[in-house]
Amino acid sequence: MMQWKMTGSAGETAQARMSDGLHQLGGSHPSIHRHLSMPLLGFGLMILLTTLFAGGCAEDDDCPICPTNPVNISGILLYPETVTVGDTLQFWATGRGSGMQFQWITTHGRFLETDQNWARWKAPASPVVASVTLVAFNDDGSSTFTKAITVSPYKPRHAPTYTGAAYCGLECHQVDGHGSNYDAWVHSAHANAYGRQGESPETQGKCAACHTVGYGDIDERGWDIHNGGFDEIPVPGLQGVQCEACHGPLANADGEILDEHGELAIGDFLIDTCKGCHTDDTIEWAEDIHSPQVQMLAGEGGYGYEQTIPSSPHQDIVPRGCVTCHYPTSGEEGSSHTFAADPTSCSACHPEASGIDLRMNEVADLLMLLKAELSQASEEDKLYYSYEWALRNATLVEKDGSSGAHNYEYSKTLLNLSLQNFEPSGNMDRN
Ligand code: HEC
Ligand code: HEC
Ligand code: HEC
Ligand code: HEC
Ligand code: HEC
């Protein structure tokens, strides 16, 4: 029987991961079994792996059954065994040898993580035959093993899956269909949100969760779900904030629209869907503030100069969350899906709408004033907290974008305090 002699803690981690993997192979998630090409594959592989690695040695010495050198890699196992575009795979190499170092090499795709004879690998975005090579070496020699991996065109393994707005729009939800949500949406900022995000691999990871459809969905075990989100098939059809970003994935694994999608996808749960993206729970520095609407409504995120800042009650009293004010139905059919703030929505609670406009102008004016002060700051001023705090409050109000409609008391007070506490050059009361 062949086996690695694992040495030290890294080896143990690799083994722990492996048994983790085994657990997941035979694990309880029903859909994994459902989508394996051979139903018993998971179980079979589990027995195989258990046999191969049973009795693996933690220490070099006192190992009665393991042969020692020379180094020999006997194989590379992969899970899952079928690979499509965008998949993430795990590899385990089998073999023998001790005191070794390992080097993983690939012709396509990339390694997300490697640890001795274990690796996690992300398949490339287009179909190809990739070669994955492991070189193992120690003082006495080396061994190389190459495995060819056929990366097939994309096929989701988990349902429901994402189809893209074009399908929803062209099949049903356009002017000539039973609603014009598509037409309202397609010209909105949501539809075009991807362009703003930028396309570099770095921005993909950080930004795509809120600027694309289905990016990085994970299941209850924390594993990527292979259900056709933008992380698996980075196609233009899934760029931007599309129907399914709010309504959820609509198709089965073969791309057929789920019969029940109308019931599943429309409902009160949608009211909270906005909050998943329009939020920034790590506000610390002005320059990092991004889409802080949830925080603004809650009266959070600003610098309060160690005081309790008053907050208006919208968050607690609007019956349908953001959608109370951002679901215009008074315009053309389907205009709701621009999600622009609806002026007529205010009158249910504020019959005197002009008073509201006045207060929004007041906040907008205060913001302009503070920004003018900040723009006068000298390089030295910028070294002080008083500058950063005022900048943070100005940025919060500006990025919120509602000129105090979300939270008048909070916006107004933050801006006023900032104006009191920051003055460009010459201010003697610096903090
Ligand atoms: C938590 C979700 C989320 C993440 C992550 C995110 N964005 Fe956004 N982004 C939004 C939302 C929501 C808006 C629209 C709300 C607004 O304009 O305040 C937005 C608006 C924008 C805008 C236009 C408005 C502006 O502030 O300039 C740009 C540009 C942008 N994002 C770029 C990015 C980039 C680049 C990244 C990655 C570094 C990123 N976003 C990450 C949610 C997110
Ligand atoms: C930004 C989130 C969001 C996006 C994007 C979105 N919707 Fe909606 N949709 C909603 C919300 C919220 C409701 C209202 C739910 C309620 O009233 O309980 C809704 C309601 C609906 C309704 C039922 C009411 C009506 O107006 O007919 C349909 C149909 C619908 N959406 C289709 C679509 C289609 C098609 C797209 C893509 C073109 C889309 N939606 C994009 C959030 C969204
Ligand atoms: C998947 C993430 C996501 C969800 C869910 C989402 N948004 Fe957005 N929203 C964005 C992004 C990103 C932008 C910025 C687009 C841009 O300017 O490039 C945006 C922009 C907006 C804008 C600004 C429009 C403009 O013209 O600048 C409004 C208003 C808005 N969203 C309201 C909502 C509402 C209301 C909901 C819930 C029904 C919602 N959003 C759900 C990500 C999201
Ligand atoms: C009490 C009504 C109300 C509620 C609740 C509300 N908004 Fe607003 N929102 C407004 C108004 C009014 C504006 C200002 C619109 C304007 O200036 O045209 C606005 C502005 C915005 C903007 C900037 C729009 C732009 O064109 O740049 C975004 C984004 C936004 N809201 C998202 C949200 C989100 C997300 C929620 C829920 C977390 C929410 N709003 C809750 C009334 C509301
Ligand atoms: C569900 C009821 C409700 C809706 C809808 C609503 N508001 Fe309010 N709003 C309130 C309440 C309650 C207050 C706090 C009491 C007050 O000051 O009138 C408030 C306060 C405000 C304030 C601060 C006024 C002040 O003097 O403190 C502004 C500004 C405001 N709302 C704007 C809007 C706008 C703009 C809309 C529509 C886009 C809107 N609200 C929709 C209930 C609502």
Image: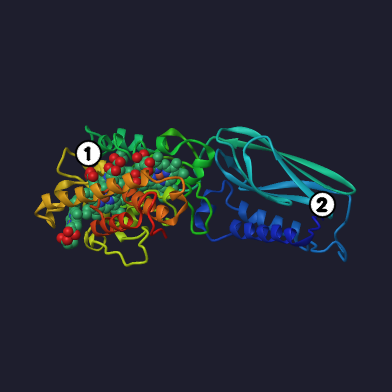
Q: Compared to 196, does 49 lie above or below?
A: below
| Ligand 2 has an atom within 8 Å of the beta carbon of the residue at disc 1 | yes
**Which amino acid is tagged 1?**
Gly
Question: Label 2 neighbourhood size at 10 Å, few (<14), some (14-19), many (20+)?
Answer: many
Q: Which residue is drawn at 85% across and 59% down?
A: 66
Whether residue 141 can be seen here: yes
Residue denoted by label 1: 179
- Front-most of residues 141 and 41: 141
Residue 425 placement (x, y as % from top left)? 39, 49
As drawn, the label of residue 87 is none
Residue denoted by label 2: 100
| Ligand 1 has an atom within 8 Å of the beta carbon of the residue at disc 2 | no
Q: Which of marks 1 and 2 is in front?
A: 2
Left or right of residue 228, residue 64 in this image: right
How far apart in space, not on screen, are marks 1 and 2 (Cα)?
64 Å
**Which amino acid is tagged 2?**
Met
Q: What element carries label 2?
A: loop
Left or right of residue 146, residue 246 in this image: left
Q: Which residue is drawn at 47% across and 51% down?
A: 383
- Front-most of residues 423 and 140: 423
